[in-house]
Structure formats: C-alpha cells, structure tokens
Amino acid sequence: MRATLANAHLVVFIEHVARELDVMCAVRHLLRERHGLELAVRSTKFDLYEGMLAAGSPRVVAFPWFYEDDDGPIRRARKLWPDARYVNLAWEQVLQNINESVKTPHGELARTQVRHFAWGDFYRDLLVRYGVRAELVTVVGNPVYGLYTEPYRRYFEDKPTLAARHGLDPDKPWLLVAENYGAAFYPDSHLEVMVARGASREESWGFREFARASLRTMCEWLRDLAGPSLEIVLRPRPYTPRERFMGKLREAIGDPPPGLRVIQDGSVREWILASDAVVSSYSTSLIEAAIAEKPIAMLAPLPLPEFVKHPWYEYVPRFPSLGELRDFVLSGDPTFAALRQWATDRMLRTDPIRGMADFLAATYHDAPSVSVSPAARLDVLGRVASRSLKKAMGRRPDKAAEHDRFGQDEVTARTARWAGLAP
C-alpha cells in the first residue's frame, strides 16, 4: 500500500527550484512506479518546519548539500529524526579551485555516516580525500545532464512556446547568455564564510572584484552585439535577485537596447534547448549546452585567475574580445563536441535520473525505522505556530528569494507531467 504524504518513506529538501525541482519530481514519479515508495518534496527555505511535520517519520532525509553537521536545516531535521538515514545529493560537484574546500564535507557525521550521491569517480575521489568513507559514496551520474536525453528532454517547452510567452521572435537566431557572476553580489559575510571553510582571504575578495569587473565588461559587449537580426537572452543566475542584477547592468550600460532581453523565468534547461547558441563565463551551463549539442563559447573579458579554473575549460572556445564573440555568433560552428565527450565519459554513462531513484530506494531499504518523540514533534509544532503568528503580524520570517518558493500543487503537477514521459 502506498504511503501518504503524511507518512512519506523519504523526504528531499530543495534549495533552488530551477536547479533541483524538475529532477526531483521525475525521481518522485520513478520511486512510485519502480519501487512503490512515496517521496515528499519540500523547501529548505520557505517551509522547513511545515515540511518536517507533513513528512511524518521518513527513513531517508536528503539535503542538497551536507558540508557541516550543524548547518541550520540539517540540525533541525536531525533533532526531529535522529535515527533517519541522511543523504547528501550534492548539487554542486564540478568545483572551481576556490570552492573545493568550501563545498566539501567538514563534519564527522558527514564523513562517517551520511550517504553521498556522486556524479562521477572524480567526486567520489574528492570526498574520500576529504575524509569520507569510500563505501558511503555511490557513483550514478549527473541527473541534470540526463534531462537533455530522451525521453526527458520532451518535458520542456519549445522555442515557439517560449517566444510567445516572452515576446521573442522565433524566426531569429537566439543567443543564450547564461550569466554566472554570482560572486559579484557576495556580501562581506559570505566571503568570511568562505575563508572560515578554507578559502584564501586574498582570493575570496579577489574573486568578487574579478566577477564585478567581468560582469561590467560582459554587459558592454552584449550592448554592442545587440541588433535587429539576433535575439540575445541574458539569463541572470536564478539565485541573484533580478532587481540587484538590473542595478548592476544599468550601472554598466543604462537600459538594455532592443534585441537584448533580460529573462530570469524558467529553468536554464528550456532556454538551452530552445536557443541556437550558448555563451557564459565559467558556468557549468556550458557543459549542459554541450550535452544538448548546442554551439558554445566562454566569455573571457578578463584573464581567468587560477583560483576559478577547472580542467573542463580547456574544451571550450574562449573569446577575450567582442570581435571574436561576434564571429562566433555568426558562424554556428559545432563547438560542443570535445566538451560533450568529456562530460559524457565522466558523468552520463547511463540514465542518472533513474539511477538517483534506485539509489534512494536502496538507501531506504538499508535504513532503520524512524520514530518521532512527542517532545521533538511538539517543538516543531511550536515553531510552525510562531512562524504563522509572525506572518499574521505582517512580519516576513522568510528571507529567501521568491523564485525559490514552491507549493505542493506544483510538485503534484510536475510529477504528473513526468508520469507521461519518464520511462
């Protein structure tokens, strides 16, 4: 008998909708159909306590990261479910040099008990190097890359649909610019966290200055590239508030000219599949575009510091001038082949979406039963009541960006859509 959401077998917490929700709803469908298990999908940002109550007594609790044992959401979940099996889904695994020590496990629990989901042998080896027991790491592949393969790619809206929704011309070539200068918006407090977790202080502050200068030059290039024969879709990182991004863009070039559209809606997946070419700074969106067999190029208005480099950059054409970028846009050269081969060999050998479902099911069957103490449940009920009171008084306990808010109706709708597509 299938469990209800009030007593899910597993619960997964989502940090970023654009990055995670499509995959997890596909996995939710596959867990139901292949394993008879119910997965609750909840937010780390907006309804953590409500989601904990709704999930009941899950045996498996999966987070999008698991670096520190006492990270806020993890600590709260462990208080309610101390005996559950915890999983690190690790949505960031292709790490720049500066982020390697920041985004790897530091806590004892993370190294000795948590189950880790790996996209490839390279990440398993990295975790082991940072003290994780090898038997706790399962290599499956990157489920995001699986979205670009059949039948999963049929889930996304096509070019005519996106054109109608956003007022774009479907008959013109589309250049997607997947902006990834998130460091340009880091506050000092974030840089201090990076330093505390092992990054160099000099490099951390240098990272922000490099990103700010690169972002400004990129905006100038796109202003000069825009014209009547091309649709440029500039997509800010979904984790940067749009108003903050537009403030930086207007500082650099004023209002964007015709032909340059700033669109943050939707996931990068549908935009990659609908576009004719993709450029970015050092975003892994370029790897996704290569998997989708789209012409790709790396914008490099400033020389890349060593601390942001990664070996995959060598497989992408790099354009340090506006003229070279313009030539690329006009050429349509198939520049994706080398990077596609690199990524496929390391992270896409089988169906990683089905593999994630199978991994979570195996983790469930290996996990002990979980009971919730009345005191712990009462504590969560009190926190839910406190949040409700604050909202009723007009206060906003939620500080996360609105684009990462989702409800259970959306989870249900996306899962149902996958039911007609996923194998």
Image (spheres, rainbow, N blue to C red):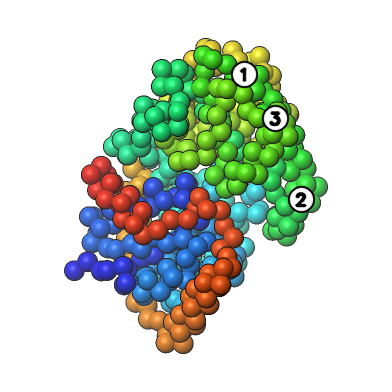
User: Can you give x and y, in whole percent of width and height, for residue 251 in the image?
Assistant: 73, 34
Q: How crowded is mark 2: few (under 14 residues within 10 Å), some or many (20 or more)?
A: some
Q: What element carries label 1?
A: helix
User: Can you give x and y, in whole percent of width and height, for residue 308 in the image?
Assistant: 68, 39
Quarter where residue 84 is shown: bottom left
Query: Which of the image's four quarters has the N terminus?
Result: bottom left
Q: Is residue 137 above or below residue 50?
A: above
- Residue 324 in view of the camera: yes
Q: Which of marks 1 and 2 is in front?
A: 1
Contact between marks 1 and 3 (CB within 8 A): the answer is: no
Q: Is mark 3 on a helix, strand or loop?
A: loop
Name the N-terminal-most of marks 1 and 3: 1
Q: Which of marks 2 and 3 is in front?
A: 3
Say which residue label 2 marks.
200
For badge 2, the amino acid type reads: Ser
For badge 1, the amino acid type reads: Leu
Viewer-closest of 158 and 189: 158
Viewer-closest of 148 and 122: 148
The numbered dot on residue 254 is 3
- Residue 195 in view of the camera: no
Q: Is mark 2 on a helix, strand or loop?
A: loop
Viewer-closest of 22 and 260: 260
Alpha carbon distance from label 2 to label 3: 35 Å
Say which residue label 1 marks.
225
Alpha carbon distance from label 1 to label 3: 15 Å
Which residue is most to the bottom?
A: 375
Alpha carbon distance from label 1 to label 2: 36 Å
Which residue is most to the left?
A: 1
